[in-house]
Image (cartoon, rainbow, N blue to C red):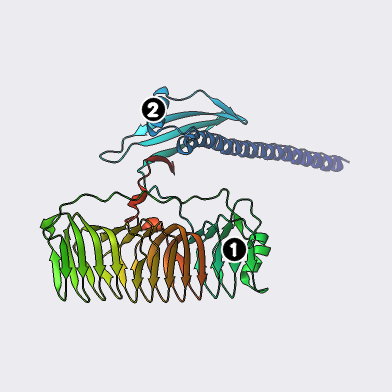
Amino acid sequence: MDLHRDEHGSALLTVLLVIIALTFLGMALMQYAMNGYRQQLRSEQRTMAYYVARSGVDAFVSYVVDNPDNLSLDSMGSLIDSAVSAGESDPTPLGQGSFRVSVARQPGGGATPDTVVVTALGSVKGVTETVRRSIILKSGGSAMPTVDCAVFSLRSLMMHSNSHITGNVGTNSTEAGSVEFKEGAWIDGRLSVGPNGKPEDIIRVSDEDHPMKSKVENDEVGTLLQPRSYPLPKFPVYPSLKIPNPSMLSVKGATTSIPEEDGDLWYSKIDIGNSAVLDIHVGSGTRRIRVDDLSIGNSGQIRIIGDGKLILYASSLKISNSAQLNGDGLDRQLHIYYSGQDKLKFRNSAKFNGSVFAKEASLDLANSTDISGHIITGGQSVKISNGVSGDVRLIYAPNAAITLHNGVELNGALVGKTVTLKDEAKVTWNDPLDSPEGLEDFGTAPPSYARGLWH
C-alpha cells in the first residue's frame, strides 16, 4: 500500500509540473503573440503615418505646381516665401492622424534657381513618419501647342493602300465616317477621336477582316477630353537691313561667296544658275539675309560656311530640280521665312536641311526629295509624294489638307486640317521638341514650378 501511495504521489507531482510548465509556456506564447500584435499594430500605424505625411506634402506641392488659382510666378513665389517664414504649421487632422507641414528653400548656387523642399510630419496614435519632396523652378520651353501624336487632324483622317502610322493618332472630328481605313492601312499606336464621339460611327473600316475593325469593336479607341486648337505663330515683320551695291547678285557656273564681314544684307534679287554654288559665311553667330526674289536653278546650291546660323527672309522663292539648301549642313543652321503666295516646291532629289515658316504658301515635296527640319505653313495644301523621305520633325499646317502618297517615309509629327495617307506612305513618331531649333516662332513659355524628387 505504501508503494502504491508513493507511485500515486509521484504521478500527481508529474502532472502538477506539466501543468505549471504548460502554464508558463502559454503565458510565454501569449506574451509573444501580444508583442507580435503590438509590432504589427505599430507597423500599420507607421504606414498610416507615412501616408498621412505624404498627403500633406502632396497638398502643398499640387497647389504650387497645378496653380488652380492661376497665380503669377511672382505671386506664387511670395506665397512660398510666406510659408517658409511661417515655419511648421499647426496639426491638420486627416483620418486617424494628423500632419504638420513646413517649407524651406535650398540655395541653387550660380544660375541654378533655388529648390523648394516641402516637409510633412505625419502622426498616428503617437507614431510619426517624415516625408519630403522638392519643387523645382524649370525654365520656360517652347510655347508651341501640345504635339504628342505622330498625326493629328483637326477634321478628317483617311488611310488607304497599306499606309502605316507608328505612334499615336488623333482627330477633333466627331462626324460619321470622318476617319476611314482601307486596304491594309494601319495605326501602330492609340487612336483618339473627338470629345464625346462614338468611334463606331466616326470610324469606317472597309474590310471585314481589317485589324482596325477589332480596335473599334474592342473599345480600344479613345476620345479626347476637349477639342484641340493649333493656331499659327505670328509671322515676323521682315527687318530693314543694309542694301549692298549692287543689290542684285547673279551666280553663274562657279562658286560665289558672301563674306561674313559684309554683315546682314538686303538683296533685291539673288539668282543662282544651274549647278552654281553660293557660299554664305556665317562665322559662329547668326547672320540675316533678306532677298526680295531668290531663285535656285537645277542642281544649284546654297552652302552655309561656319558653325553659326543663317536666317533667310524671302518674298519670292523658286527652287528647281535637285537644288540643295544647306545640303551638307545641320538643320539647326538654316531658318527660312517665306512671305510669298506662290507654291513652295522641293522636287526631283532636292535636298534641304533647315526649317521653313511659310506665311500662306502651299507646299509640294516630290520625287525623292530629302528634307530634315521643321515646316510651318499657313497654306491650304501640303502634298508630299513619290519617295520623299526625311526627318521632318514637325509639319505644322493647321489650315492645310495634308496628303502623303507613293512610298513617302517621314519621321516626326504632322498637324493638318485634314490628313490623307495612301500608297504605302509611312509616318513614324518622333518628338519635335527633341530638336527645338526652328520652333522659336512659337515663342517661349514662362518659367513654371514642377514636381521634384521624393526624399
**Pointer 1 or 2: first along the chain:** 2
Q: Are marks 1 and 2 in contact (CB under 8 Å)?
A: no
Q: Amino acid at mark 2?
A: Ser
- Residue 321, above or below 234: below
Q: Secondary structure at mark 1?
A: strand
**Quarter of the N terminus within the rendering:** top right
From the viewer's perspective, is 329 left or right of 54?
left
Q: Quadrant of residue 44?
A: top right
Q: What is the residue that sits farthest to the right in this orientation?
A: 1
Q: Position of residue 74 (x, y in %)?
A: 37, 31
**Quarter of the C terminus within the rendering:** top left
What residue do we see at 42% from left, 58% from top?
Answer: 396
Closer to viewer: mark 1 or mark 2: 1
Q: Nearer the viewer, residue 8 or 134?
A: 134
Q: Amino acid at mark 1?
A: Val
User: Label 2 belongs to which residue?
Assistant: 78
- Residue 240, above or below 448: below
From the viewer's perspective, is 164 left or right of 409?
right
> Dot 2 surroundings within 10 Å: few (below 14), some, or many (20 or more)?
few
Q: Nearer the viewer, residue 281 or 321?
A: 321
Total residue callouts? 2
What residue do we see at 51% from left, 69% from top?
Answer: 421
Q: Quadrant of residue 304?
A: bottom left
Q: Nearer the viewer, residue 312 or 193?
A: 312
User: Label 1 belongs to which residue?
Assistant: 179
Q: Mark number for residue 296?
A: none
What residue do we see at 47% from left, 70% from top?
Answer: 404
- Residue 63, above or below 315: above
From the viewer's perspective, is 252 left or right of 174?
left
Q: Position of residue 82 (x, y in %)?
A: 40, 25
Q: Secondary structure at mark 2?
A: helix
Q: Look at the image and tell me whether residue 385 can be seen.
A: yes
